[in-house]
């Protein structure tokens, strides 16, 4: 499956309409981004049940700012409208597969419960993976 290009116009709908979305925040001028691109594309072909998306941080500065992206590439994983993972850096294939596997195994009921507990204590939502 090819990757989707996310924009401020389609971001919310893509994330809301899909249970599991991987997002690569990147830019054309970024060497590590270009290095990560084929690894990410190959993973999208191995996992056709998942949505693989990209955000061009140059074309979509509002999205980059909204997610406080300070280094690219940054990989984010969103499950059930919850950001469960975010990490800068070009991941090698094995590391990307490990992240996907861990994200698949997460019990989202437990994640939502821990978010509720953190919010009740006055903390914000936290990434779980």
Image: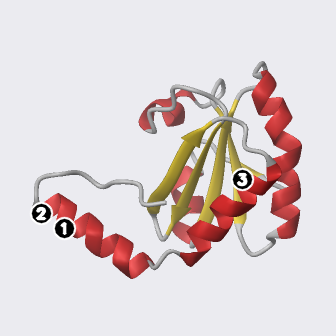
| Crowd class of label 1 (few under 14; some 14 to 19; many from 20; radius 10 Å) | some
Mark 3 and mark 1 lie on one chain; the one further toward the N terminus is 3
Q: Secondary structure beneath disc 2?
A: helix
Kindly indicate the quadrant of the structure image that contains residue 117. Answer: bottom left
- Compute the Cα span from label 2 to label 3: 34 Å
- Compute the Cα span from label 3 to label 1: 30 Å
Towards the viewer: 106 or 58: 106
Which quadrant of the figure contains the N terminus? bottom right
Residue occupying image coordinates x 88% and y 64%: 45
2 sits left or right of 119 in the view: right
| Crowd class of label 3 (few under 14; some 14 to 19; many from 20; radius 10 Å) | few
In x, y percent, where is residue 60?
Answer: 60, 31
Residue occupying image coordinates x 55% and y 27%: 61
Q: Reply above or below: 122 against 27.
A: below
92 sits left or right of 75 in the view: right
Q: Are marks 1 and 2 in contact (CB under 8 Å)?
A: yes
Q: Are marks 3 and 1 in contact (CB under 8 Å)?
A: no
Q: Are marks 2 and 3 in contact (CB under 8 Å)?
A: no
Instruction: Give the number of callouts.
Output: 3
Say which residue label 3 marks: 95
Q: Reply above or below: 97 against 4.
A: below
In x, y percent, where is residue 102?
Answer: 59, 68
Residue occupying image coordinates x 72% and y 53%: 95
Say which residue label 1 marks: 117
Q: Secondary structure beneath disc 1?
A: helix
Circle nearer the viewer, 3 or 1: 3
In x, y percent, where is residue 4?
Answer: 75, 53
- Compute the Cα span from label 1 to label 2: 5 Å
Residue occupying image coordinates x 50% and y 74%: 106
Say which residue label 2 marks: 120
Q: Reply above or below: 59 against 1.
A: above
């Amino acid at each position: 499956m090819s990757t989707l290009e996310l924009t401020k116009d389609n971001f919310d709908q893509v994330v809301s309409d899909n249970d599991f979305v991987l997002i690569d925040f990147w830019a054309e001028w970024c060497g590590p981004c270009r290095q990560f691109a084929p690894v990410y594309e190959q993973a999208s072909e191995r996992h056709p049940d998942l949505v693989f998306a990209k955000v061009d941080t140059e074309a979509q500065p509002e999205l980059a700012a909204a997610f406080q992206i300070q280094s690219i590439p940054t990989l984010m994983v969103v499950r059930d409208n919850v950001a469960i993972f975010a990490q800068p850096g070009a991941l090698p294939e094995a590391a990307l597969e490990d992240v996907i596997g861990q994200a698949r195994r997460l019990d989202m009921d437990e994640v939502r419960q821990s978010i509720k507990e953190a919010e009740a204590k006055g903390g914000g939502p936290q990434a779980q993976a």
